[in-house]
Amino acid sequence: MKPWETLESANLPDVGELTLVRRGDEYVLRVRGQTLMSSRMHGSEEALAKAGCAGVVTSGTGRVLVGGLGFGYTARAVLDTVGPGVRVSVVELLPTVVAWNRGPHLAPLAGAPLEDKRVTVIEGDVGDVMAHHSATFDAILLDVDNGPSALTHPDNQGLYGLPGLSNAARALRSGGTLAVWSAGPAPAFERRMEKCGFTVEVLHPHAHGTKGPRHVLFIGKLGRSRR
Ligand SMILES: C[S@@+](CC[C@H](N)C(=O)[O-])C[C@H]1O[C@@H](n2cnc3c(N)ncnc32)[C@H](O)[C@@H]1O
């Protein structure tokens, strides 16, 4: 088997070593040696966008907040789902990840979503962005970690707790959707979403194609019942 080739690496304060590696046509983003994202599996990242944006207008205006850029698959799927008048804010904690997404290795993977005129890139914490907005977004999509119970960034704990979910609810317009990606089930998180006013549907899309492991999506609708 071919060895992994390191394409980029950066040592980031409070994060540790971030590396972008490639083997054949597979790209992997690692934080402190742990895989955060692989280009081989992005079916559930795209499903997050489709389920989260189902209520967002395909014509006219609307606003979508995407938390976590990664390799840009979710952002791309949002752009392919919503209409030309919808504005999409993509928030990424690590400026290095944004820079790599504009570079020759990552930009082509998801069709260069950052070049789309509808996109604004915000370098920062999606938790802060939600905390500073009120009744603004039609959909908020969060894929910033391995999910509510598996954190690669310990500071993200707050996003998945009651204060973070309350901020998400406040940042959404009435009838808006909070969609959260998770590597596995998280029943306590689902209950917290409900406590914050969301009616929750849980989806189990395949990580890739129609076979193999499944991930979990929590799709929370605010102010309208889906059951
Ligand atoms: C698993 S990747 C996202 C994958 C993405 N959905 C895709 O389709 O490629 C998680 C991303 O979230 C970023 N991130 C982690 N914590 C964050 C936070 N609090 N705010 C914004 N971005 C964050 C990470 O740096 C990483 O780029």
Image (cartoon, rainbow, N blue to C red):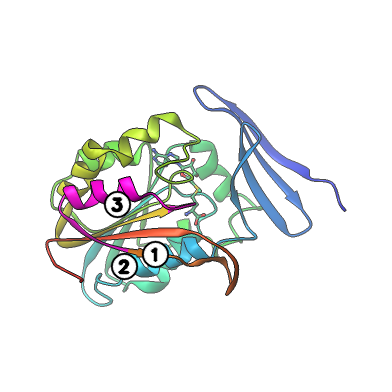
Q: Identify which residue, 131 or 216, lies in the foreground.
A: 216
Q: Does the magenta stretch include residue 181?
A: no
- The residue that appears at 41% across and 63% down in the rendered structure is 48
For residue 21, above or below residue 205: above
Q: Which amino acid does label 1 sit on?
A: Ala
* Rendered location of residue 5, percent (x, y): 79, 44
Q: Where is residue 92 in the image (x, y as percent from the top left)?
A: 43, 43
- Callout 2 secondary element: loop
Which residue shows up at 25% across the image and 49% down it?
191
- Front label number (1 vs 3): 3
Between residues 134 and 218, which one lies in front from this camera angle?
218
Cα distance in 3D space between marks 2 and 1: 6 Å
Magenta region = 182-201
The numbered mark at residue 190 is 3
Q: How crowded is mark 3: few (under 14 residues within 10 Å), some or many (20 or more)?
A: many
Neighbourhood count class around disc 2 (C-alpha, 10 Å): few under 14, some 14–19, many 20 upward? many
Residue 130, label in figure: none
Real-space Cα separation, disc 2 to disc 3, in angstroms = 19 Å
Which residue is under mark 2?
53
Which quadrant holds the C terminus? bottom left
Which of marks 3 and 2 precedes in the sequence? 2
Relative horizontal placement of residue 126, taking residue 19 as reference (left or right) = left
User: Exactly how many numbered labels are in the figure?
Assistant: 3
Q: Earlier in the sequence, mark 1 or mark 3?
A: 1
Q: In which quarter of the image is residue 213?
A: bottom right
Q: What element carries label 3?
A: helix
Return the residue at label 1: 49
Residue type at tag 3: Glu
